[in-house]
């Protein structure tokens, strides 16, 4: 009984330090140390205060509170923890490093049934690159089965005029590294409308078909030649024209007839007309 009372008093003292640090009334280092200790000794009683601290105070404290909440969830499952971490992930007002920490902590305590939140980050145009990277890592960790489709969507969302070129190039790099032997076949199916994306409606008028054909050439330049040659001869006028343009770029890039990957142009639509 004495031990339980002592633990309760200790937890209360730690919570006060976290709350004071979050409000700017206490020493930041004391709040950080208190949150670290609550990872192992915190009970369900600590959840509301840590959830509140996740929304205010120094970035380092918020990050530590996300870790404490995740650790506590493994001992005392509470939907409030999941809601708080999800809210931190989705909030554009949260610092990027806090959002990344929330993604990583949430991925460690949920299964693939909770992948929706991470998918939404990947397919939003205004998601910062570091958050996209964390979300993709979470999906890999959870064994999410449609990684290629989500990367293609991220590439398309960030290929628009107001998109982030760094995120677009990151998506290309991840697609190159993706261990999926059917990569080109799947993108080929997306181009022809035989494979539908969940969050992005492919539109020829926006230049999406050209972007996808360029993507095939960037992901696997050597192997894409066979696909592009077939598309040049046996597809609609728009697809055929785009495939022919990308083939020319592949062959001209080296000047010796050996295909090499084209760079992503400033205007994808111009590529189809070159």
Image (spheres, rainbow, N blue to C red):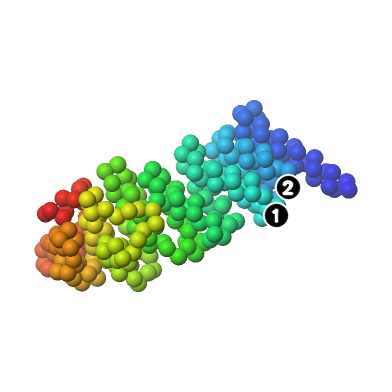
Q: Provide residue 62's location: percent of width, then percent of height.
A: 57, 40
Tell me the quarter of the image containing the C terminus. Answer: bottom left
Q: Provide residue 145's location: percent of width, then percent of height.
A: 45, 65
Check the image and name the residue furthest to the right: 1
Q: Provide residue 63's location: percent of width, then percent of height.
A: 56, 43
Name the element at disc 1: helix
Check the image and name the residue furthest to the top: 25
> With respect to residue 63, does 176 lie above or below?
below
**Badge number at residue 216:** none
**Badge number at residue 75:** 1
- Tell me: 94 left or right of 67: left
Distance between the alpha carbons at the discs numbered 2 and 1: 8 Å
Q: Is residue 263 visible?
A: yes
Residue 108: quadrant of the picture: bottom right
Q: Nearer the viewer, residue 255 or 75?
A: 75
Q: Nearer the viewer, residue 73 or 258?
A: 73
> With respect to residue 28, does 38 lie above or below?
below
- Tell me: 181 left or right of 139: left
Q: Are marks 2 and 1 in contact (CB under 8 Å)?
A: yes
Q: Residues within 10 Å of mark 1 (few under 14, many from 20)?
A: few
> With respect to residue 43, does 17 lie above or below?
above
Name the element at disc 2: loop
Q: Provide residue 239's location: percent of width, then percent of height.
A: 19, 61
* Residue appearing at x 77%, y 41% in the figure: 10
* Residue appearing at x 84%, y 44% in the figure: 5
* Residue appearing at x 35%, y 61% in the figure: 196
Q: Residues within 10 Å of mark 2 (few under 14, many from 20)?
A: some
Q: Is residue 247 visible?
A: no
Label 2: which residue?
A: 43
Earlier in the chain: of badge 2 and badge 1, it is: 2
* Residue appearing at x 57%, y 34% in the figure: 56
């Amino acid at each position: 009984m004495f031990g339980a009372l002592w633990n309760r008093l200790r937890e209360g003292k730690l919570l006060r330090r976290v709350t004071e640090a979050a409000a700017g009334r206490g020493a930041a280092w004391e709040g950080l140390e208190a949150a670290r200790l609550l990872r192992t000794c915190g009970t369900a009683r600590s959840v509301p205060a840590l959830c509140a601290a996740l929304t205010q105070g120094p970035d380092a404290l918020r990050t530590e509170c996300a870790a404490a909440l995740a650790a506590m969830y493994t001992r005392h499952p509470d939907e409030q923890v999941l809601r708080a971490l999800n809210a931190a992930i989705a909030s554009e007002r949260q610092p990027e490093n806090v959002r990344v920490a929330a993604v990583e902590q949430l991925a460690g305590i949920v299964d693939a049934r909770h992948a929706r939140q991470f998918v939404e980050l990947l397919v939003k145009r205004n998601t910062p690159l570091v958050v996209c990277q964390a979300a993709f890592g979470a999906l890999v960790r959870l064994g999410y089965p449609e990684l290629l489709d989500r990367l293609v969507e991220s590439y398309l969302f960030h290929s628009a005029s107001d998109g982030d070129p760094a995120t677009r190039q990151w998506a290309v790099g991840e697609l190159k590294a993706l261990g999926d032997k059917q990569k080109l076949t799947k993108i080929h199916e997306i181009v022809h409308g035989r494979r539908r994306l969940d969050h992005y409606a492919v539109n020829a008028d926006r230049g999406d078909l050209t972007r996808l054909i360029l993507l095939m050439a960037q992901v696997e330049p050597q192997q894409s030649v066979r696909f592009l040659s077939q598309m040049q001869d046996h597809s609609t006028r728009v697809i055929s024209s785009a495939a022919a343009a990308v083939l020319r770029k592949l062959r001209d890039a080296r000047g010796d007839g050996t295909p090499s990957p084209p760079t992503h142009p400033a205007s994808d639509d111009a590529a189809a007309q070159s």
